[in-house]
Each structure stands twice: as structure tokens, then as C-alpha cells.
Image: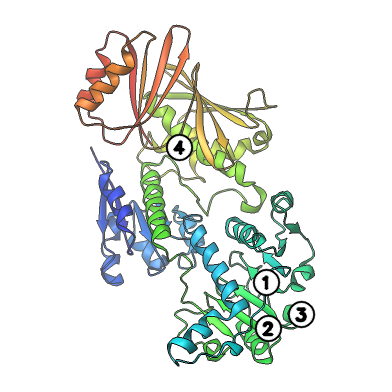
């Protein structure tokens, strides 16, 4: 069996490396310690690379990586990745946007508390200077103060909820969210940016782009109240550093807590000379828990993109990010995995692909069909298939595409059904997204069940009679194959077991399972 090659360009947590090593169809090459010029000499081997901030994915990098299909940035920021050039080369760029969420949230809260009570300086005076001068350290209380949050996404929203526990009045500004996301948790929402500028403490949690660079400059600071506290644990450059310096010197800004800078490492930044500034060296993601999560999610994304089953959190897709709600984005990933799943079950020439979308997702059928085609074609051809050329490749192969949108007729607000017609017959699979970001398969042909589409999956269809489940479990145990999850659907006198396993399933094990008298069919899928 040919293997996909994943090159790790920068250091990640050992858990991510172990996940890559465990995948039987992946060859992992860890070159994190190699000098960057030496690294480029090895990139021609890579189907997928995993990077952090130390490796620049620029034109020379992409030219060296001649068969590259995806870049996984193990973290949130992609400042070091040339996304436009990657797109021209047909390379999908992904990040890991939520694994460090709690770490960044808690660091933000730490900066707020440090600024309000002067903890770092009080600590230094007592420990370093051995002075006991309580009168130097009169702070203020959070209770009753106004906190303005710019950007109410994964991090900003969680900061708001935690600060509510301090009995603060919290106000959110984010033109890209539904206001109920804030108001449903007791947080005020405003479309007037000046309302944020009137707050006692302001924290910013936006991405870095043309719209947000220098979002807080001299003009905005001039509108703030005297003695405001400013926090930035998001991206460097959201606050104009020269304007911030002047405001700190004049005490217009009483304190600032900064984790990120325009240019890093920031060891010579003039802001460091100011006494009313607390700083940390870009450690928003630096917790043991978040580093492990980042590595695991990056490794999983690299494996899935190498296989072509999905490209989680892709940043250069043929959809406009701000125009698609988060719940809909999850359906894009889901439908790609469903198509990848379906073609592995029906290994035959594809005649047609039909998508039925129920609910509000029917408005996005065109994008859904593109993602489905990428999943379908990546599983069947060796050429590079991406979100730009997939429809043309499908047309060349004579695959008929049928799209149907309708009002929701199921128990789910939104549901997508994919029907694949091959020479073998029709195969149907349906999926829905739970809690906005948990995709699940909810039906396979006539069988209703719920299972997350990830990892190694055995589909065992049988006559519904006693003893079958026990036989399957015993057989897998005999071969040291651990069952991670077991879901059962029943229809008439038949049953379908969908079994998620932790270990590779050899063909001889599948053959042994198929020899059970009650077995009607067995398939093995890897997502």
C-alpha cells in the first residue's frame, strides 16, 4: 500500500507525532530540527506539511514542495503563510483555530486582573526589593466596571462570560455575529464602536487583516475615558504601538496588558520601557493542555487532508468566509467526508451524485456540491483535486450532478443527504451538524444511527438475530483491535453495525467477519 508523506517542519507536542506515526497509510518525517535551507531540499517528498511560526511558507517553499496538496499551520495565525500563492499552486491552507482557545482566554483574564490590581509590580517589590509597602498597591475592583470586547468569537465570548462572574458590565462589538450570541448570555451588544471606547477596560480579539490593523489609533484613544485599561492578547498591530506608547506616557491609558507585538521577538520595543505596561512574550497558547490539543488537531487535519477526506478549517476555499455562518461551514466539511465515505463503500465507476439539502443549508447547495466532489474524486483518482478544478474533473469523467433543496422534513433543522449512483447501485448517506460544530452521519441507506465520521470504520450489515454483536466483538478482540465506538441501526429484519476502531483492520479480519452466516455485507472505510 502506497503511503502519504507528511513532513513536520516545526516542533509540535509528542501526542501529535504519535498520532501521525500510528496512521498506517502515513509516512511521517520529522524535520523540525533541520535548518530551513536544508528543510527545503526534502520538501519534494511532502504531500502535506505541518508548520508553526518558525517556517515561512513562501514562493521558494512552495516551489520546492512540488507535490504538496496542503499546509497545516499548528496554531491560529497564518502570517507566515502566503495564502494567495498557495492557492495559485493548488495548495490548501489550514489552521487550528480553537485548540488554544481556553489558554488565550485565561491569559487575557490574567492581564485584566494584573492591570486592575498591579500584581506583577507588587510581587517584584516584595520578592526582589524586600519592601513591605502596602500603601503602594491600591488597585480598583472589577465589580461594576464596564468591559468592552472587540471581537466576540471563540475567545472574546469566553472572556465575556468569565468577566460577568466578576459582576462587570460587559459590552460586545462584532459586526459579523448575530447579536443574540451576546445577549443570550447576558452581555450587551452594540453596533456603535464608540460605545466600546467609553468602557473602563477594553480587550480586543479580532483577526489581523486590512480592516483591523491599527484599529485602535490616536483618534480612537482620544475618545476613551481617562485612565482606561487596554488589553491585547490577540495579534500584534491591532493597537497602533506609537499611539499606545504616547497614551501610556500621558496616563490617558492607565495600564495596558500586551502579549503580542507588531514585530516579534519584541526585545527592543520602546513599549518595554514604560512602567504602566504589563507584557508577556506571545504566550497565549502556552499551556501544556493547549499545545497537546494543537498538535493532535494539526496531525488529524494533516492525515485527513493527505487522504483527501476533508480539509478542516481551510482558509483558501471558494467561499466567502464572512458570508457563511459557522453552522453552514461545518456542513461543508461534513459533506466532503460523506462523499469520501460513500465512494469507499461503493468502489465502482460513479454515474451520478445527488445532493438533497433540507433547511437553510439549501441556499448553499453549490458550495456543498463542490466539497462533495472533492471528497469523491480524492478517493478515486491520483491527480490533485481541489475546490477550483473538482467540478471540471467531474464533468470530464461524465459524472452527473443533481442538486435539490427543500424545506426541512426531518427532526433536524438542517440535513444533507448524498446519493451516489454507481454500476453497483445506489448508496445513500445523510448527515447533520450538532451544536453548530459536531458533524455526524445520521443515516446510511435505510438505517438510522448517529456516528462521527472520523478514523477507521467497519460497516457490518447482517440478518438481525442474536449473537452477531458478540461474535463481532470477540473476533476483533482476538486480533487485538480495540472498539472505540459501536452504533447500531435496524431496518426490518436487517441490522447495520457501524464500528469505529482504534487499530488498522487487516483484510483477513474482514474476511473472517464476513464468514459469519448472518453477514450480508462488510465494508471498511478510513476517513
In the rendered image, the quadrant that contains the N terminus is: top left
Q: Which residue is mark 3?
A: 225
Residue wearing tag 2: 253
Label 1 neighbourhood size at 10 Å, few (<14), some (14-19), many (20+)? many
Find residue 441 and report its horizontal and vertical position in percent.
49, 30
Cβ atoms at labels 4 and 1 below 8 Å apart: no
Reading the image, the residue beneath label 4 is 375
Q: Quadrant of residue 350?
A: top left
171 sits left or right of 62 in the view: right
Whichever of callouts 1 and 3 sits on the residue coming sooner in the sequence is 1
Using the rendered image of the protein, determine whether residue 288 is visible from the camera's viewpoint: yes
Q: Secondary structure at mark 4?
A: helix
Residue appearing at x 37%, y 62% in the figure? 63
Mark 4 in CB contact with mark 2 (< 8 angstroms)? no
Report the residue marked by disc 1.
202
Instruction: Please rate how many residues cluster around mark 4, counting C-alpha atoms within 10 Å: few if below 14, some from 14 to 19, many from 20.
Output: many
Question: Is residue 74 visible in this depiction of the protein?
Answer: no
Amino acid at each position: 500500500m502506497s503511503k502519504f508523506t507528511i513532513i513536520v517542519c516545526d516542533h509540535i507536542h509528542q501526542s501529535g507525532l504519535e498520532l501521525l506515526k500510528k496512521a498506517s497509510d502515513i509516512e511521517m518525517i520529522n524535520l523540525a530540527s533541520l535548518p530551513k535551507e536544508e528543510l527545503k531540499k526534502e520538501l519534494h517528498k511532502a504531500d502535506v506539511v505541518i508548520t508553526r511560526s518558525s517556517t515561512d511558507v513562501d514562493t521558494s517553499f512552495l516551489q520546492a514542495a512540488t507535490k504538496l496538496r496542503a499546509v497545516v499551520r499548528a496554531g491560529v495565525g497564518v502570517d507566515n503563510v502566503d495564502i494567495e500563492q498557495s492557492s495559485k499552486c493548488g495548495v490548501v491552507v489550514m489552521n487550528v483555530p480553537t485548540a488554544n482557545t481556553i489558554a488565550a482566554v485565561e491569559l487575557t483574564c490574567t492581564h485584566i486582573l494584573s492591570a486592575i490590581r498591579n500584581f506583577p509590580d507588587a510581587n517584584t517589590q516584595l520578592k526582589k526589593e524586600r519592601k513591605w509597602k502596602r500603601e503602594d498597591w491600591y488597585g480598583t475592583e472589577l465589580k461594576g466596571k464596564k468591559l468592552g470586547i472587540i471581537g466576540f468569537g471563540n475567545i472574546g465570548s469566553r472572556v465575556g462570560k468569565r468577566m460577568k462572574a466578576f459582576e462587570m458590565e460587559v459590552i460586545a462589538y462584532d459586526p459579523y455575529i448575530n447579536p443574540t450570541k451576546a445577549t443570550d448570555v447576558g452581555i450587551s451588544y452594540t453596533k456603535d464602536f464608540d460605545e466600546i471606547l467609553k468602557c473602563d477596560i477594553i480587550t480586543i480579539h479580532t483577526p489581523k487583516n486590512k480592516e483591523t490593523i491599527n484599529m485602535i489609533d490616536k483618534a480612537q484613544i482620544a475618545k476613551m475615558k481617562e485612565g482606561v485599561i487596554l488589553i491585547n492578547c490577540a495579534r500584534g498591530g491591532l493597537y497602533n504601538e506609537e499611539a499606545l506608547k504616547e497614551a501610556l506616557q500621558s496616563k490617558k491609558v492607565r495600564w495596558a496588558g500586551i502579549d503580542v507585538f507588531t514585530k516579534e521577538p519584541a526585545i527592543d520595543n520602546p513599549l518595554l520601557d514604560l512602567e504602566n505596561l504589563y507584557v508577556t512574550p506571545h504566550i497565549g497558547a502556552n499551556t501544556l493542555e493547549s499545545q497537546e490539543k494543537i498538535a493532535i488537531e494539526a496531525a488529524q487535519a494533516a492525515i485527513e487532508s493527505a487522504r483527501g477526506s476533508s480539509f478542516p478549517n481551510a482558509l483558501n476555499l471558494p467561499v466567502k468566509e464572512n458570508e457563511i455562518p459557522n453552522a453552514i461551514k461545518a456542513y461543508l466539511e461534513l459533506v466532503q467526508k460523506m462523499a469520501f465515505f460513500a465512494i469507499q463503500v461503493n468502489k465502482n465507476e460513479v454515474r451520478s451524485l445527488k445532493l438533497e439539502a433540507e433547511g437553510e443549508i439549501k441556499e448553499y447547495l453549490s458550495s456543498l456540491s463542490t466539497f462533495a466532489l472533492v471528497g469523491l474524486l480524492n478517493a478515486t483518482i491520483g491527480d490533485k483535486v481541489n475546490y477550483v478544478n473538482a467540478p471540471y474533473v467531474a464533468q470530464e469523467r461524465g459524472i452527473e450532478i443533481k442538486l435539490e433543496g427543500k424545506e426541512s422534513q426531518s427532526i433536524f433543522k438542517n440535513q444533507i443527504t448524498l446519493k451516489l449512483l454507481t454500476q453497483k447501485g445506489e448508496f445513500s448517506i445523510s448527515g447533520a451538524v450538532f451544536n453548530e460544530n459536531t458533524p455526524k452521519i445520521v443515516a446510511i441507506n435505510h438505517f438510522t444511527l448517529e456516528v462521527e465520521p472520523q478514523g477507521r470504520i467497519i460497516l457490518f450489515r447482517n440478518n438481525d438475530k442474536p449473537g452477531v454483536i458478540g461474535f463481532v466483538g470477540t473476533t476483533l478482540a482476538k486480533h487485538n483491535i480495540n472498539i472505540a465506538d459501536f452504533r447500531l441501526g435496524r431496518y426490518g429484519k436487517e441490522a447495520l453495525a457501524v464500528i469505529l476502531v482504534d487499530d488498522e483492520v487487516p483484510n483477513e479480519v474482514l474476511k473472517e467477519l464476513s464468514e459469519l452466516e448472518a453477514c450480508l455485507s462488510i465494508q471498511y472505510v478510513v476517513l
